[in-house]
Image (cartoon, rainbow, N blue to C red):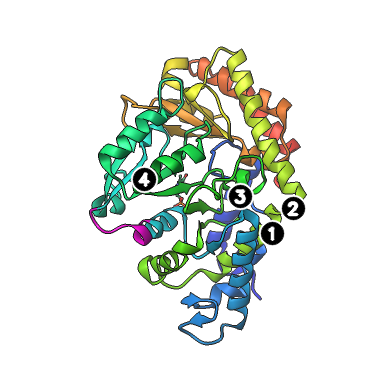
Amino acid sequence: MNPLRKTDPDVARILRGEAKRQQDGLEMIASENYVSQAVFEALGSVLSNKYAEGYPGKRYYGGQEWTDAIESLAIDRAKALFGAEHANVQPHSGAAANLAAYMAVLNPGDTVLGMDLSHGGHLTHGASVTLPAKIYRFAHYKTEADGSIDYAKLERLANKEKPKLMLAGFSSYTRTIDYERFAAIARKAGAVPMMDMAHIAGLVAGRALLSPVPFFDIVTATTHKTLRGPRGGLILSTEAFADRIDKAVFPGTQGGPHMHTIAAKAVAFGEAATPGFRTYAKRILSNAKALEKEFRARGVVPVFGGTDNHMLLIDTVASYGISGRTAQDLLDGIGISVNKNVVPDDPRGPSDPSGIRLGVPAATTRGMRAPEMRRIAGWIDEVLRSGGDTSVAARAKREVKASCREFPIA
Ligand SMILES: *Cc1c(COP(=O)(O)O)cnc(C)c1O
Protein backbone atom coordinates (compact mmCIF):
# COMPACT_ATOMS: atom_id res chain seq x y z
CA MET A 1 0.00 0.00 0.00
CA ASN A 2 1.19 3.50 -0.84
CA PRO A 3 1.06 5.86 2.13
CA LEU A 4 -0.75 9.19 1.86
CA ARG A 5 2.46 11.21 2.11
CA LYS A 6 3.58 9.58 -1.18
CA THR A 7 0.27 9.57 -3.08
CA ASP A 8 -0.99 12.98 -1.95
CA PRO A 9 1.64 15.10 -0.22
CA ASP A 10 -0.67 18.16 -0.21
CA VAL A 11 -3.29 16.47 1.94
CA ALA A 12 -0.63 14.80 4.08
CA ARG A 13 1.00 18.16 4.80
CA ILE A 14 -2.34 19.66 5.91
CA LEU A 15 -3.03 16.69 8.20
CA ARG A 16 0.43 17.05 9.77
CA GLY A 17 -0.27 20.73 10.35
CA GLU A 18 -3.54 19.99 12.13
CA ALA A 19 -1.92 17.25 14.22
CA LYS A 20 0.72 19.73 15.37
CA ARG A 21 -1.90 22.38 16.09
CA GLN A 22 -3.79 19.91 18.28
CA GLN A 23 -0.61 18.76 20.03
CA ASP A 24 0.77 22.22 20.78
CA GLY A 25 -2.50 24.04 21.50
CA LEU A 26 -4.88 23.95 24.41
CA GLU A 27 -8.36 22.86 23.33
CA MET A 28 -11.01 24.50 25.49
CA ILE A 29 -13.89 24.22 23.03
CA ALA A 30 -16.53 22.44 25.11
CA SER A 31 -17.73 20.18 22.28
CA GLU A 32 -14.30 18.83 21.29
CA ASN A 33 -12.24 15.89 22.45
CA TYR A 34 -9.49 13.46 21.35
CA VAL A 35 -10.42 9.93 20.32
CA SER A 36 -8.36 6.84 21.04
CA GLN A 37 -6.17 4.97 18.57
CA ALA A 38 -8.81 2.21 18.60
CA VAL A 39 -11.54 4.64 17.47
CA PHE A 40 -9.23 5.93 14.69
CA GLU A 41 -8.55 2.37 13.53
CA ALA A 42 -12.25 1.56 13.27
CA LEU A 43 -12.86 4.82 11.38
CA GLY A 44 -10.10 4.08 8.88
CA SER A 45 -11.30 0.52 8.30
CA VAL A 46 -12.69 -1.57 5.42
CA LEU A 47 -16.23 -0.80 6.58
CA SER A 48 -15.82 2.55 4.82
CA ASN A 49 -16.28 0.59 1.58
CA LYS A 50 -19.68 -0.91 2.39
CA TYR A 51 -23.28 0.07 1.66
CA ALA A 52 -25.79 -1.20 4.22
CA GLU A 53 -29.14 0.57 3.80
CA GLY A 54 -31.64 -0.81 6.27
CA TYR A 55 -31.02 -2.41 9.64
CA PRO A 56 -29.36 -5.68 10.80
CA GLY A 57 -31.24 -8.60 9.23
CA LYS A 58 -33.28 -6.22 7.02
CA ARG A 59 -30.82 -4.77 4.47
CA TYR A 60 -31.46 -3.75 0.88
CA TYR A 61 -28.06 -4.95 -0.43
CA GLY A 62 -26.21 -8.26 -0.08
CA GLY A 63 -22.93 -9.04 1.66
CA GLN A 64 -24.05 -7.92 5.11
CA GLU A 65 -22.59 -10.62 7.38
CA TRP A 66 -20.09 -8.27 9.06
CA THR A 67 -22.06 -5.03 8.81
CA ASP A 68 -24.94 -6.74 10.63
CA ALA A 69 -22.49 -7.99 13.26
CA ILE A 70 -20.93 -4.56 13.87
CA GLU A 71 -24.23 -2.63 13.96
CA SER A 72 -25.82 -5.20 16.32
CA LEU A 73 -22.80 -4.93 18.59
CA ALA A 74 -22.97 -1.12 18.59
CA ILE A 75 -26.71 -1.21 19.36
CA ASP A 76 -26.28 -3.73 22.19
CA ARG A 77 -23.43 -1.73 23.72
CA ALA A 78 -25.37 1.56 23.50
CA LYS A 79 -28.43 -0.02 25.14
CA ALA A 80 -26.36 -1.53 27.95
CA LEU A 81 -24.27 1.62 28.49
CA PHE A 82 -27.29 3.89 28.87
CA GLY A 83 -29.88 1.39 30.10
CA ALA A 84 -32.12 2.16 27.10
CA GLU A 85 -34.83 -0.06 25.62
CA HIS A 86 -33.92 0.92 22.07
CA ALA A 87 -30.90 2.45 20.32
CA ASN A 88 -30.42 3.71 16.77
CA VAL A 89 -26.71 4.19 16.01
CA GLN A 90 -27.08 5.40 12.40
CA PRO A 91 -27.56 9.20 12.71
CA HIS A 92 -24.67 10.94 10.92
CA SER A 93 -24.55 13.71 13.54
CA GLY A 94 -26.40 15.27 16.44
CA ALA A 95 -28.38 17.49 14.08
CA ALA A 96 -29.40 14.44 12.02
CA ALA A 97 -30.45 12.61 15.20
CA ASN A 98 -32.66 15.54 16.22
CA LEU A 99 -34.21 15.86 12.75
CA ALA A 100 -35.13 12.16 12.78
CA ALA A 101 -36.49 12.37 16.33
CA TYR A 102 -38.71 15.29 15.30
CA MET A 103 -39.94 13.35 12.29
CA ALA A 104 -40.73 10.34 14.50
CA VAL A 105 -43.03 12.37 16.74
CA LEU A 106 -44.32 15.37 14.81
CA ASN A 107 -46.46 16.30 11.84
CA PRO A 108 -45.62 19.48 9.90
CA GLY A 109 -46.98 22.49 11.74
CA ASP A 110 -46.84 20.84 15.19
CA THR A 111 -45.38 22.80 18.09
CA VAL A 112 -42.10 22.06 19.88
CA LEU A 113 -41.13 23.74 23.14
CA GLY A 114 -37.33 23.99 23.52
CA MET A 115 -34.72 26.03 25.33
CA ASP A 116 -33.99 29.50 23.92
CA LEU A 117 -30.72 29.57 21.94
CA SER A 118 -29.20 32.45 23.92
CA HIS A 119 -30.07 30.70 27.19
CA GLY A 120 -28.16 27.58 26.19
CA GLY A 121 -30.34 25.75 23.66
CA HIS A 122 -28.97 24.47 20.34
CA LEU A 123 -29.52 25.73 16.78
CA THR A 124 -31.40 22.51 16.02
CA HIS A 125 -33.92 23.40 18.75
CA GLY A 126 -35.74 25.76 16.43
CA ALA A 127 -33.42 28.55 15.26
CA SER A 128 -35.26 30.30 12.42
CA VAL A 129 -32.49 29.60 9.87
CA THR A 130 -32.89 25.79 10.19
CA LEU A 131 -35.02 23.32 8.25
CA PRO A 132 -36.91 22.07 11.37
CA ALA A 133 -38.03 25.65 12.03
CA LYS A 134 -39.51 25.79 8.53
CA ILE A 135 -41.41 22.52 9.10
CA TYR A 136 -42.49 22.80 12.74
CA ARG A 137 -43.51 25.65 15.02
CA PHE A 138 -40.99 26.26 17.82
CA ALA A 139 -41.63 28.07 21.07
CA HIS A 140 -38.88 28.65 23.63
CA TYR A 141 -38.41 28.78 27.39
CA LYS A 142 -35.70 30.77 29.14
CA THR A 143 -33.59 30.61 32.28
CA GLU A 144 -33.94 32.99 35.24
CA ALA A 145 -31.41 35.67 36.24
CA ASP A 146 -29.82 33.27 38.76
CA GLY A 147 -29.36 30.59 36.08
CA SER A 148 -32.20 28.35 37.26
CA ILE A 149 -35.27 27.21 35.36
CA ASP A 150 -38.62 28.32 36.83
CA TYR A 151 -40.70 25.14 36.46
CA ALA A 152 -44.00 26.80 37.37
CA LYS A 153 -43.38 29.29 34.56
CA LEU A 154 -42.41 26.42 32.22
CA GLU A 155 -45.67 24.66 33.05
CA ARG A 156 -47.71 27.77 32.26
CA LEU A 157 -45.86 28.14 28.96
CA ALA A 158 -46.46 24.48 28.08
CA ASN A 159 -50.17 24.84 28.78
CA LYS A 160 -50.31 27.95 26.60
CA GLU A 161 -48.24 26.65 23.65
CA LYS A 162 -49.62 23.08 23.67
CA PRO A 163 -46.43 21.46 22.28
CA LYS A 164 -46.40 17.91 20.87
CA LEU A 165 -42.73 17.63 21.87
CA MET A 166 -40.91 19.20 24.81
CA LEU A 167 -37.16 19.44 24.51
CA ALA A 168 -34.67 19.48 27.34
CA GLY A 169 -30.98 19.73 26.49
CA PHE A 170 -28.46 22.42 25.73
CA SER A 171 -25.12 23.46 24.29
CA SER A 172 -24.08 26.22 26.66
CA TYR A 173 -26.31 25.88 29.74
CA THR A 174 -24.16 24.83 32.69
CA ARG A 175 -26.65 23.92 35.41
CA THR A 176 -28.74 20.84 36.21
CA ILE A 177 -32.20 20.25 34.75
CA ASP A 178 -34.79 18.56 36.99
CA TYR A 179 -35.58 15.73 34.56
CA GLU A 180 -38.41 14.28 36.60
CA ARG A 181 -40.20 17.60 36.87
CA PHE A 182 -39.54 18.53 33.25
CA ALA A 183 -40.91 15.23 31.91
CA ALA A 184 -43.96 15.41 34.20
CA ILE A 185 -44.78 18.91 32.89
CA ALA A 186 -44.44 17.66 29.30
CA ARG A 187 -46.69 14.64 29.83
CA LYS A 188 -49.32 16.70 31.63
CA ALA A 189 -49.36 19.16 28.71
CA GLY A 190 -49.78 16.27 26.24
CA ALA A 191 -46.22 16.49 24.89
CA VAL A 192 -43.60 13.79 24.37
CA PRO A 193 -40.60 14.56 26.64
CA MET A 194 -37.29 14.47 24.76
CA MET A 195 -33.77 15.14 26.01
CA ASP A 196 -30.88 16.20 23.76
CA MET A 197 -27.84 15.14 25.80
CA ALA A 198 -25.37 15.87 22.97
CA HIS A 199 -22.92 17.62 25.28
CA ILE A 200 -23.19 15.50 28.41
CA ALA A 201 -23.57 11.97 26.96
CA GLY A 202 -20.09 11.03 28.21
CA LEU A 203 -20.81 12.36 31.69
CA VAL A 204 -23.99 10.28 31.74
CA ALA A 205 -22.20 7.18 30.38
CA GLY A 206 -19.48 7.65 33.00
CA ARG A 207 -22.10 7.93 35.78
CA ALA A 208 -20.87 11.40 36.78
CA LEU A 209 -24.27 12.97 36.03
CA LEU A 210 -27.78 11.62 36.54
CA SER A 211 -29.04 9.79 33.46
CA PRO A 212 -32.01 11.35 31.66
CA VAL A 213 -32.83 8.00 30.01
CA PRO A 214 -35.37 6.77 32.63
CA PHE A 215 -37.34 10.03 32.43
CA PHE A 216 -37.61 10.76 28.69
CA ASP A 217 -39.27 8.84 25.84
CA ILE A 218 -36.53 9.92 23.45
CA VAL A 219 -32.91 10.87 24.19
CA THR A 220 -30.61 12.06 21.41
CA ALA A 221 -26.84 12.41 21.69
CA THR A 222 -23.65 13.05 19.80
CA THR A 223 -20.89 10.49 20.10
CA HIS A 224 -17.95 12.88 19.70
CA LYS A 225 -18.25 15.37 22.56
CA THR A 226 -17.80 14.17 26.15
CA LEU A 227 -18.47 10.60 24.94
CA ARG A 228 -15.09 10.77 23.13
CA GLY A 229 -16.06 8.69 20.10
CA PRO A 230 -16.24 9.39 16.35
CA ARG A 231 -18.24 12.31 14.99
CA GLY A 232 -21.81 11.06 14.91
CA GLY A 233 -25.25 10.86 16.45
CA LEU A 234 -27.25 8.42 18.54
CA ILE A 235 -30.95 8.08 19.40
CA LEU A 236 -32.16 6.19 22.47
CA SER A 237 -35.86 5.60 23.04
CA THR A 238 -38.47 3.53 24.75
CA GLU A 239 -39.69 0.43 22.93
CA ALA A 240 -42.92 2.30 22.07
CA PHE A 241 -40.99 4.75 19.87
CA ALA A 242 -38.47 2.24 18.44
CA ASP A 243 -40.20 1.62 15.13
CA ARG A 244 -40.98 5.29 14.44
CA ILE A 245 -37.39 6.31 15.30
CA ASP A 246 -35.88 3.68 13.00
CA LYS A 247 -38.15 4.63 10.09
CA ALA A 248 -37.45 8.33 10.62
CA VAL A 249 -33.67 7.76 10.45
CA PHE A 250 -33.86 5.46 7.43
CA PRO A 251 -35.48 5.99 5.00
CA GLY A 252 -36.98 9.14 6.56
CA THR A 253 -33.97 11.42 6.72
CA GLN A 254 -30.84 9.46 5.73
CA GLY A 255 -29.57 7.03 3.12
CA GLY A 256 -26.86 4.45 3.72
CA PRO A 257 -25.38 4.32 7.22
CA HIS A 258 -21.67 5.08 7.68
CA MET A 259 -20.59 1.62 8.80
CA HIS A 260 -17.00 2.64 9.61
CA THR A 261 -18.38 5.30 11.96
CA ILE A 262 -20.76 2.77 13.51
CA ALA A 263 -17.77 0.49 14.16
CA ALA A 264 -16.00 3.40 15.84
CA LYS A 265 -19.13 4.14 17.88
CA ALA A 266 -19.10 0.51 19.07
CA VAL A 267 -15.47 0.98 20.16
CA ALA A 268 -16.33 4.23 21.98
CA PHE A 269 -19.32 2.65 23.76
CA GLY A 270 -17.01 -0.16 24.87
CA GLU A 271 -14.45 2.34 26.18
CA ALA A 272 -17.16 4.37 27.95
CA ALA A 273 -18.27 1.26 29.87
CA THR A 274 -14.86 0.86 31.59
CA PRO A 275 -13.92 1.99 35.12
CA GLY A 276 -11.27 4.22 33.54
CA PHE A 277 -13.95 6.17 31.73
CA ARG A 278 -15.90 6.66 34.97
CA THR A 279 -12.80 8.19 36.48
CA TYR A 280 -12.48 10.39 33.39
CA ALA A 281 -16.08 11.60 33.67
CA LYS A 282 -15.64 12.44 37.36
CA ARG A 283 -12.42 14.33 36.59
CA ILE A 284 -14.21 16.42 33.98
CA LEU A 285 -16.61 17.65 36.65
CA SER A 286 -13.90 18.35 39.21
CA ASN A 287 -11.77 20.10 36.58
CA ALA A 288 -14.68 22.35 35.55
CA LYS A 289 -15.21 23.19 39.23
CA ALA A 290 -11.51 23.99 39.65
CA LEU A 291 -11.64 26.27 36.62
CA GLU A 292 -14.74 28.01 38.00
CA LYS A 293 -13.11 28.44 41.41
CA GLU A 294 -10.05 30.14 39.96
CA PHE A 295 -12.16 32.52 37.87
CA ARG A 296 -14.18 33.40 40.97
CA ALA A 297 -10.98 34.02 42.94
CA ARG A 298 -10.10 36.50 40.20
CA GLY A 299 -13.47 38.22 40.52
CA VAL A 300 -15.10 36.65 37.44
CA VAL A 301 -18.52 35.11 38.09
CA PRO A 302 -19.60 32.74 35.30
CA VAL A 303 -22.99 33.12 33.57
CA PHE A 304 -25.75 30.98 35.21
CA GLY A 305 -23.86 31.44 38.50
CA GLY A 306 -21.41 28.56 37.96
CA THR A 307 -21.27 25.06 36.53
CA ASP A 308 -22.60 21.58 37.30
CA ASN A 309 -21.14 20.06 34.14
CA HIS A 310 -18.07 20.30 31.88
CA MET A 311 -18.34 23.91 30.76
CA LEU A 312 -18.33 27.54 31.83
CA LEU A 313 -19.89 30.50 30.09
CA ILE A 314 -18.06 33.78 30.66
CA ASP A 315 -19.60 37.16 29.87
CA THR A 316 -16.48 38.88 28.54
CA VAL A 317 -18.26 42.20 28.05
CA ALA A 318 -19.31 42.30 31.70
CA SER A 319 -16.05 40.90 33.10
CA TYR A 320 -13.42 42.39 30.79
CA GLY A 321 -15.13 45.02 28.65
CA ILE A 322 -14.36 43.11 25.43
CA SER A 323 -16.62 41.16 23.06
CA GLY A 324 -16.62 37.39 22.70
CA ARG A 325 -14.97 37.60 19.30
CA THR A 326 -12.16 39.80 20.58
CA ALA A 327 -11.67 37.41 23.50
CA GLN A 328 -11.60 34.40 21.15
CA ASP A 329 -9.00 36.13 18.95
CA LEU A 330 -6.80 37.11 21.91
CA LEU A 331 -6.89 33.51 23.19
CA ASP A 332 -6.18 32.09 19.72
CA GLY A 333 -3.06 34.26 19.84
CA ILE A 334 -1.74 32.35 22.88
CA GLY A 335 -2.72 28.89 21.63
CA ILE A 336 -5.97 28.45 23.56
CA SER A 337 -8.99 27.56 21.38
CA VAL A 338 -12.39 28.66 22.67
CA ASN A 339 -15.61 29.69 20.97
CA LYS A 340 -17.38 33.00 21.19
CA ASN A 341 -20.88 32.43 22.52
CA VAL A 342 -24.10 34.32 23.14
CA VAL A 343 -25.19 34.94 26.72
CA PRO A 344 -28.88 35.00 27.80
CA ASP A 345 -30.82 37.62 25.79
CA ASP A 346 -27.52 38.78 24.32
CA PRO A 347 -27.90 42.35 23.02
CA ARG A 348 -25.07 41.66 20.53
CA GLY A 349 -25.46 39.42 17.46
CA PRO A 350 -24.17 35.82 17.19
CA SER A 351 -21.21 36.86 15.01
CA ASP A 352 -19.75 39.02 17.78
CA PRO A 353 -21.58 38.02 20.96
CA SER A 354 -20.97 38.99 24.60
CA GLY A 355 -19.22 35.89 25.84
CA ILE A 356 -17.04 32.84 25.41
CA ARG A 357 -17.72 29.20 26.29
CA LEU A 358 -15.00 27.14 27.96
CA GLY A 359 -14.98 23.35 28.26
CA VAL A 360 -12.57 20.96 29.96
CA PRO A 361 -13.21 17.53 28.31
CA ALA A 362 -10.27 17.71 25.86
CA ALA A 363 -7.78 19.02 28.45
CA THR A 364 -8.99 16.31 30.86
CA THR A 365 -8.34 13.65 28.19
CA ARG A 366 -4.73 14.93 28.07
CA GLY A 367 -4.46 14.19 31.78
CA MET A 368 -4.72 17.76 33.07
CA ARG A 369 -6.09 18.19 36.59
CA ALA A 370 -6.88 20.96 39.08
CA PRO A 371 -3.39 22.58 39.12
CA GLU A 372 -3.49 22.90 35.32
CA MET A 373 -7.07 24.25 35.48
CA ARG A 374 -5.87 27.01 37.81
CA ARG A 375 -3.10 27.91 35.40
CA ILE A 376 -5.50 27.88 32.42
CA ALA A 377 -7.92 30.23 34.20
CA GLY A 378 -4.91 32.40 35.02
CA TRP A 379 -3.71 32.62 31.40
CA ILE A 380 -7.20 33.37 30.12
CA ASP A 381 -7.91 35.95 32.83
CA GLU A 382 -4.57 37.73 32.43
CA VAL A 383 -4.71 37.90 28.64
CA LEU A 384 -8.33 39.11 28.54
CA ARG A 385 -7.56 41.67 31.23
CA SER A 386 -4.34 42.87 29.55
CA GLY A 387 -5.98 44.95 26.83
CA GLY A 388 -3.85 43.23 24.18
CA ASP A 389 -0.49 43.72 25.97
CA THR A 390 1.97 41.77 23.81
CA SER A 391 4.39 40.88 26.62
CA VAL A 392 1.56 39.30 28.66
CA ALA A 393 0.45 37.35 25.58
CA ALA A 394 4.00 36.23 24.70
CA ARG A 395 4.61 34.83 28.19
CA ALA A 396 1.20 33.09 28.29
CA LYS A 397 1.81 31.60 24.85
CA ARG A 398 5.15 30.11 25.96
CA GLU A 399 3.59 28.66 29.09
CA VAL A 400 0.58 27.20 27.22
CA LYS A 401 2.90 25.45 24.78
CA ALA A 402 5.13 24.11 27.55
CA SER A 403 2.10 22.79 29.40
CA CYS A 404 0.80 21.06 26.26
CA ARG A 405 4.22 19.41 25.77
CA GLU A 406 3.97 18.16 29.36
CA PHE A 407 0.55 16.60 28.62
CA PRO A 408 0.82 15.10 25.11
CA ILE A 409 -2.22 13.76 23.29
CA ALA A 410 -1.91 10.00 23.57
C1 LIG B 1 -23.57 19.62 19.26
C2 LIG B 1 -25.03 19.59 19.45
C3 LIG B 1 -25.89 19.12 18.44
C4 LIG B 1 -25.43 18.89 17.02
O1 LIG B 1 -24.48 17.97 16.83
P1 LIG B 1 -23.72 17.89 15.40
O2 LIG B 1 -23.07 16.56 15.45
O3 LIG B 1 -22.81 19.05 15.34
O4 LIG B 1 -24.78 17.97 14.35
C5 LIG B 1 -27.23 18.99 18.73
N1 LIG B 1 -27.72 19.32 19.93
C6 LIG B 1 -26.94 19.82 20.92
C7 LIG B 1 -27.56 20.17 22.22
C8 LIG B 1 -25.57 19.99 20.70
O5 LIG B 1 -24.81 20.51 21.65
Instruction: State if disc 4 and disc 3 touch (CB < 8 Å).
Output: no
- Left or right: 408 in relation to 386: right
Residue 327: image location, x then y, percent? 47, 26
Label 3 CB sits under 8 Å from any ligand 1 atom: no
Sequence-wise first label, 3 or 1: 3
- Left or right: 291 in relation to 170: right
Instruction: State if disc 2 and disc 1 touch (CB < 8 Å).
Output: yes
Residue numbers of the magenta segment: 102-109
Q: Quarter of the image for the N terminus: give it.
A: bottom right
Task: Find disc 1 in the rendering and name its residue.
Answer: 270
Q: Residues within 10 Å of mark 2 (few under 14, many from 20)?
A: some
User: Helix or strand or loop: what does disc 1 sit on?
Assistant: helix
Task: Find disc 2 in the rendering and name its residue.
Answer: 274
Sequence-wise first label, 3 or 2: 3
272 versus 30 height, above or below: below
Residue 289: image location, x then y, percent? 64, 27
- Left or right: 110 in relation to 326: left
Task: Find disc 4 in the rendering and name its residue.
Answer: 125
User: How far apart are the two marked residues, 3 and 4, measured between alpha carbons?
Assistant: 21 Å
User: How far apart are the two marked residues, 4 and 1, measured between alpha carbons?
Assistant: 30 Å
Foreground: 275 or 362?
275
Task: Find disc 3 in the rendering and name its residue.
Answer: 227
User: How far apart are the two marked residues, 2 and 4, measured between alpha carbons?
Assistant: 32 Å
The amino acid type, in three-letter code, at marker 4 is His
User: Helix or strand or loop: what does disc 2 sit on?
Assistant: loop
The amino acid type, in three-letter code, at marker 1 is Gly
The amino acid type, in three-letter code, at marker 2 is Thr
